[in-house]
Image (spheres, rainbow, N blue to C red):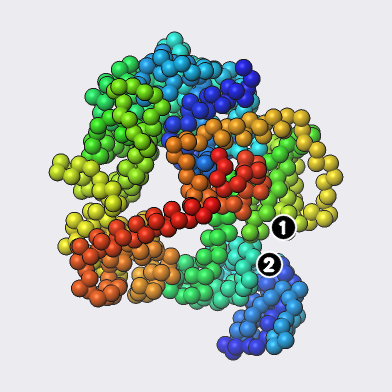
């Protein structure tokens, strides 16, 4: 293996990244870094774009060379917003080729620890949003939720709500990434929210009353003698409050 | 009375029940909703407790007069009763908007236990059949209700439970003269014997009030241990007593015994996941927990001759005995040490918290500091000191808000 001075560029999608990683490994090149092609290099950095022929067969090749679990881990890291996620995925995969599934126990390797930490962060946030996401009912009965998660978890959330609210029309919008997931009681489709602009977001007649009921329930269910704002903040950090309707009009010390 | 007022009254009456878990079931039928094996928290109340279920009473009218209970017959409070349609409407509307994982329903007792439980069954049945609700339901069985009603209810819900309320019969006689522990025992027995994937799939739990009567921690933990063994309960919840009523039989407390409650939960974990027995952590001479130190650390200090344990060779069971090392950490250590010799630095990288553990372990026969510091008094002082520092910094940070 030889260390390269180039920053390698890919097309900012998972398939393209995997294809690039495969080329690099075949050519025995250790990249200085890997970045999406929108990356602006600094004065001392040099970028390089490999000729990548994108093909979904790469997914099967990765699984054959390692395992489905490892591919899954790599995908979750890709969905994070970590600054160096590409190079972390690269090193993780290089180790995975050697150790296979044992890699999950090789936490003495720095790049493995780092990769698994990011994976956990993504899984953790997915789990949190399964609880914290709030739907509002629009006129016509469509359920509408807005989220701004740290990681790109709209796919995992869509899978969850496809099972849970299978007989409802629902829409989840990730405002941070301009992504929107639309479920038609059959399947969900994730697309850019620029292509699918919902003009009429008027709430249903019952919506305000139900939200009020919930806010009152929320206030009532706490035991005054046990008030512990710090504990609440640990479990439900303020960054999530914006769309949690019972919290959105509160400050740290309100009941 | 409008729905909002009813909900406030009947949630307020239900809030002292500690259980809000929605785990242990994986229901897939039903057009609306399913359950997640791991459970999901949807919000956290101002007291820091998780909100996962719509926790309500069917009614707060009650024929009983239990001294500690806000809904006792002789209390002059507003009373309300939900209709079954109202329960369904609220549950469904909250569930669709992803506010909740499901319903937790309990009730005061009107007329008699059978009558009350029938009302609960009607509401839940409507929710399951007419609204095709497939989410989580936890119902409280009414002690004294007939077996055929238990059977009916158990087939509709994920969890069915009955609260023992007070750890000893004497306590119960004193504060809840209308209640009979044998009736609770009967429910637990029935649920335990008949449990299947369809009947109470998430198992049963119970709750004890801590500090309303004079029981020792030993008595409380023995009671828990008996119930875990005899009825295979999923959880025992401990609820620090909060004075809602004035009665000469009740203690007057300034603040609820939250630290004691916390110690009981820690000990409860030791029983369920760490292979400890009650007699390991408490005995007649020391029937109560040390409030300064957690039960596992107390135990380890008393058995310091068994330490330090070598991370690279000691058994899984021994790993579990180390303060600060949990089940996940222990598993991680066991699977990793096949591939490399673990050092202190590796433990950190593996995400294992060394704050407490470091005093009780060696890595490749090395102690984290000069081995002369491996001494009961020094370790005890350090452990207590670290806790204190943490608490003080908590207070400071709180004051900043």
Residue B376 is tagged as none
Pointer 2 residue: A14
Is B167 placed left or right of A14 in the picture?
left
Q: In the image, residue B155 lies at what x, y percent?
A: 48, 26
- Camera sees residue B36: no
Q: In the image, residue B38 lies at what x, y percent?
A: 49, 46
Q: In the image, residue B192 lies at what x, y percent?
A: 35, 31
Disc 2 to disc 1, C-alpha distance: 19 Å
Give the SS element for disc 2: helix
Which sits in the foreground, B61 or B312? Answer: B61
Say if B341 sits above or below B261 in the image: below
Q: Residue at horizontal 63%, vertical 59%?
A: A150
- Which class describes the residues within 10 Å of circle 2: few (<14), some (14-19), or many (20+)? some
* Earlier sequence position, callout 2 versus callout 1: 2
Chain name for mark 1? A
Q: Residue at horizontal 72%, vertical 81%?
A: A41
Q: Quadrant of residue B63?
A: top left
Pointer 1 residue: A176
Q: Quadrant of residue B6?
A: top right
Which sits in the foreground, A152 or B394? Answer: B394
């Amino acid at each position: 293996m030889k260390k390269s001075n180039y920053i390698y560029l890919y097309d900012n999608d998972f398939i393209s990244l995997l294809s690039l990683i495969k080329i690099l490994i075949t050519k025995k090149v250790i990249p200085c870094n890997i970045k999406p092609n929108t990356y602006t290099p600094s004065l001392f950095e040099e970028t390089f774009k490999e000729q990548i022929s994108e093909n979904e067969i790469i997914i099967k090749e990765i699984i054959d060379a390692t395992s489905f679990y490892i591919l899954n881990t790599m995908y979750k890291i890709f969905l994070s917003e970590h600054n160096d996620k590409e190079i972390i995925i690269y090193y993780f995969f290089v180790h995975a080729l050697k150790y296979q599934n044992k890699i999950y126990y090789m936490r003495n390797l720095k790049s493995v620890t780092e990769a698994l930490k990011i994976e956990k962060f993504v899984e953790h946030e997915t789990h949190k949003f399964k609880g914290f996401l709030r739907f509002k009912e629009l006129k016509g009965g469509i359920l509408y939720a807005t989220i701004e998660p740290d990681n790109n978890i709209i796919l995992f959330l869509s899978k969850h709500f496809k099972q849970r609210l299978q007989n409802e029309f629902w829409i989840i919008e990730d405002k941070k990434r301009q992504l929107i997931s639309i479920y038609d009681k059959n399947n969900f489709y994730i697309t850019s929210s620029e292509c699918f602009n919902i003009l009429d977001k008027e709430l249903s007649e019952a919506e305000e009353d139900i939200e009020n009921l919930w806010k009152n329930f929320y206030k009532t269910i706490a035991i005054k003698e046990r008030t512990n704002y710090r504990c609440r903040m640990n479990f439900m950090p303020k960054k999530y409050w914006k769309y949690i309707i019972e919290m959105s009009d509160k400050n740290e010390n309100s009941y | 009375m409008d729905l909002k007022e009813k909900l406030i009254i009947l949630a307020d009456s239900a809030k002292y029940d500690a259980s809000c878990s929605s785990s242990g079931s994986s229901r897939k039928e039903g057009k609306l909703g399913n359950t997640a094996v791991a459970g999901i928290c949807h919000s956290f109340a101002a007291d820091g407790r998780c909100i996962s279920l719509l926790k309500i009473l069917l009614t707060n009218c009650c024929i009983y007069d239990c001294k500690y209970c806000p809904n006792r017959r002789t209390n002059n409070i507003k009373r309300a009763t939900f209709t079954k349609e109202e329960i369904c409407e609220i549950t469904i509307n909250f569930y669709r908007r992803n506010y909740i994982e499901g319903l937790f329903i309990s009730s005061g007792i009107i007329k008699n236990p059978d009558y009350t439980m029938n009302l609960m069954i009607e509401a839940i049945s409507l929710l399951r059949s007419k609204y095709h609700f497939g989410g989580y339901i936890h119902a409280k069985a009414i002690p004294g209700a007939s077996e055929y009603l238990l059977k009916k209810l158990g087939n509709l819900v994920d969890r069915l439970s009955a609260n023992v309320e007070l750890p000893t019969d004497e306590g119960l006689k004193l504060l809840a003269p209308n209640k009979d522990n044998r009736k609770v025992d009967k429910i637990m027995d029935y649920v335990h014997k008949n449990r299947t994937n369809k009947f109470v799939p998430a198992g049963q739990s119970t709750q004890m009030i801590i500090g309303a009567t004079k029981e020792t921690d030993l008595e409380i933990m023995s009671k828990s241990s008996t119930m875990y063994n005899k009825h295979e309960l999923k959880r025992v919840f401990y609820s620090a007593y909060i004075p809602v009523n004035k009665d000469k039989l009740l203690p007057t407390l300034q603040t609820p015994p939250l630290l004691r409650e916390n110690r009981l939960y820690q000990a409860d974990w030791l029983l369920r996941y760490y292979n400890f027995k009650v007699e390991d952590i408490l005995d007649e001479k020391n029937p109560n927990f040390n409030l300064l130190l957690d039960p596992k650390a107390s135990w380890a200090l008393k058995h310091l001759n068994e330490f330090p344990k070598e991370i690279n060779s000691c058994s899984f069971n021994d790993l579990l005995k180390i303060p600060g090392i949990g089940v996940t950490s222990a598993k991680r250590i066991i699977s990793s040490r096949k591939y490399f010799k673990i050092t202190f630095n590796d433990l950190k990288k593996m995400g294992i918290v060394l704050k407490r553990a470091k005093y009780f372990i060696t890595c490749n026969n090395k102690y984290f500091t000069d081995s002369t510091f491996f001494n009961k008094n020094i370790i005890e002082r350090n452990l207590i000191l670290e806790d204190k520092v943490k608490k003080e910094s908590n207070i400071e940070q709180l004051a900043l808000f």
